[in-house]
Image (cartoon, rainbow, N blue to C red):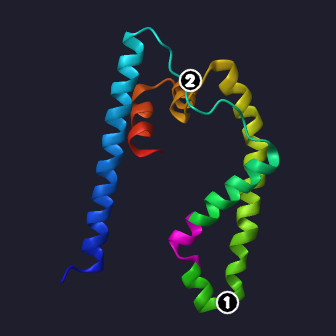
Amino acid sequence: PPTRQAVLYVLMGLYLFSLLVVAKLAHRRKTRARASGAELQAHFGGSFNAPLLLLTTFSTVYSGFTVTGIPDEAAKRGFVSLRWIGATIVIAASMMLLYPRLRRLSVERQYTNPNDFIADRFGTSRLRLGEALFGV
């Protein structure tokens, strides 16, 4: 019988393949829209208010903690694992301090993704390519 790791590798492969299919379909759609003269923009046209940003960031970071083993730590060490909640609040609060400035820059300079910021800030194509490939 296949091991659990083998099943996970297969599932990750299928997930990555599905991402490539979606990217190819999106590229085709974008190419067709440009050929017809239409202008494409991201589907998200607004911005988060502070409480929604805090809750969204908290849930995102906490779900990442869940994947990395916080439940296991909680089972082994008990209430010690509650420190991660405080850490998540600090992360979200610091993002709330940083994001308004990034939002102003993104509107002013028409950034559509983090890669645009990297390209504008550092101006090197190698770094931009690395950021696109590795999410650094």
Question: What are the residue bounds of the magenta stretch?
Answer: 64-70
Measured as percent of width and height from the top left, residue 41 is found at 54, 23
Outermost left residue: 1
**Amino acid type shown at disc 1:** Gly
Q: State which quadrant residue 2 falls in.
A: bottom left
Vertical side of 49 occupied by 32: above or below? above
Left or right: where 89 falls relative to 130 = right
For the residue pair 127 and 92, the one nearer the viewer reads as 92
For the residue pair 119 and 5, the one nearer the viewer reads as 5
Left or right: where 44 falls relative to 33 = right
Measured as percent of width and height from the top left, residue 21 is found at 31, 41
User: Residue 52: which numbered mark, if any?
Assistant: none
Q: State which quadrant residue 102 falls in.
A: top right
Residue at point 46% right, 44% down?
A: 135
In the structure shown, which secondary structural element does the residue marked by tag 1 occupy?
helix
In the structure shown, which secondary structural element does the residue marked by tag 2 occupy?
helix
Q: Earlier in the sequence, mark 2 or mark 1?
A: 1
Where's the N terminus, which quadrant?
bottom left
Mark 2 Cα shell of 10 Å, populated few (<14), some (14-19), many (≥20): few
> Separation of disc 2 and disc 1 at Cα?
46 Å
The residue to which callout 1 is attached is 78
Mark 1 Cα shell of 10 Å, populated few (<14), some (14-19), many (≥20): few
Left or right: where 132 falls relative to 108 = left
In magenta stretch: residue 12: no
Vertical side of 50 occupied by 37: above or below? above
Measured as percent of width and height from the top left, residue 127 is found at 44, 33
**Amino acid type shown at disc 2:** Asp
The residue to which callout 2 is attached is 120
Query: Which label lies toward us, 2 or 1?
Result: 1
Residue at point 81% right, 45% down?
A: 50
**Majority SS type along the magenta span:** helix
